[in-house]
Image (cartoon, helix red, strand yellow):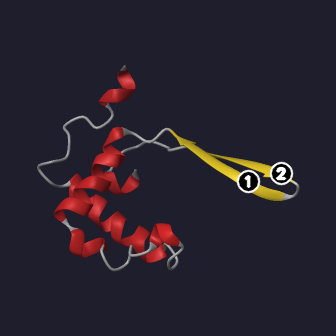
Amino acid sequence: MRALGIPFDVTDTFHVTFANGQIVAVRTSSNDLKVFNDAEEWVRRKRPELVKQPCQGYFEGGPTPELCVQAMVRGYAEFATSDDFPDDPMKELAK
């Protein structure tokens, strides 16, 4: 959220299920704000050249996510200064 200029701490929880000493399932939950998902979509739509190479294969066991994360952070910062950024990105917390 820092790249978006939002003072909000995200909490991700990982639920790992074991059977016979093996991981058999992983489930995650998060309190990400909608603007975080909007930012990712914006970067992929408006700045695909920024993330295409560093994020290639990331979810298919590809290279380390470090370069992808760095590229996304740059893209999120661009989104935060764009006309597409919402006026009140934390509005959903007031509900």
Amino acid type for the residue under numbered disc 2: Ala
- In the rendering, at what x and y percent does residue 67 appear? 43, 77
Choose the circle earlier in sequence order: 1 or 2.
2
In-image side of 13 versus 33 (left or right): right
Per the model, the C-alpha gap separating discs 1 and 2 is 6 Å
- In the rendering, at what x and y percent does residue 37 appear? 34, 47
In-image side of 80 versus 21 (left or right): left
From this view, report whether residue 20 is shown above or below residue 61. Answer: above
For label 1, the residue is: 24
Q: In the rendered image, which quarter is residue 8 located in?
A: top left
* Residue found 46% across the figure and 71% down from its top: 58
Say how many tags the image has. 2
Quarter of the image with the C terminus in it: top left
* Residue found 32% across the figure and 50% down from its top: 5
Closer to the camera in the image, 73 or 5: 73
From this view, report whether residue 51 is shown above or below residue 5. Answer: below
Amino acid type for the residue under numbered disc 1: Val
Closer to the camera in the image, 48 or 33: 48
From this view, report whether residue 77 is shown above or below residue 54. Answer: above
For label 2, the residue is: 19
Residue 90 visible at all: yes
Q: Residue furthest top?
A: 95
Q: Secondary structure at mark 2?
A: strand
